[in-house]
Image (spheres, helix red, strand yellow):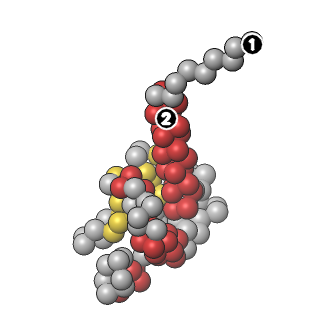
Amino acid sequence: AVMGVGSRALFDSRCAALRQLSLIFWQLCELVTNDMQLVCTSDGQELLGGERLNVCTLESLRYNSPFRASFDPDNPVCEYMSKMYKSVRDTVLFKERERERAHAHTHNAFSPSVCHCSA
């Protein structure tokens, strides 16, 4: 087994971007929250933050997909939460930006008001 990322066969079956990101996330496991974990289930389904990450092949893309011409099998197009993304890395970056926005909104919602008073 490849430490922390499943069996060697399962690891090798993933595209390069998923292999890289899963190793990075595993190394940073104490810093990565559940909503950013990248997991491959025993039946081969990819999950990002517990939500299904559908990794597309060139053959599975619609004929008129805007991502068809730039398709990269090492960093393929993904469907995540009913939206299509140009690549695995773009999907993860989008998820991270959304997580940061939610965190900032939550943080700001509970921040005390600031008053600038003149003396």
Say which residue appears at 31% left-offset and 65% top-offset.
45
Q: Element at badge 1?
A: loop
Question: Residue 29: percent from the left, percent from the top?
Answer: 41, 67
Q: Residues within 10 Å of mark 2 (few under 14, many from 20)?
A: few
Badge 1 is on which residue? 118
Q: Element at badge 2?
A: helix
Residue 33 visible in the shown view: yes
Picture quarter with the C terminus: top right
Say which residue appears at 46% left-offset and 28% top-offset.
110
70 or 21: nearer the viewer: 21
Badge 2 is on which residue? 107
Is residue 3 found left or right of 42 in the rendered image?
right
10 or 61: nearer the viewer: 10
Q: Distance between the residues labelled 2 and 1?
A: 27 Å
Question: Residue 11: percent from the left, percent from the top?
Answer: 39, 80
Question: Residue 36: percent from the left, percent from the top?
Answer: 42, 56
Mark closest to the chain's N terminus, 2 or 1? 2
Question: Residue 75: percent from the left, percent from the top?
Answer: 55, 68
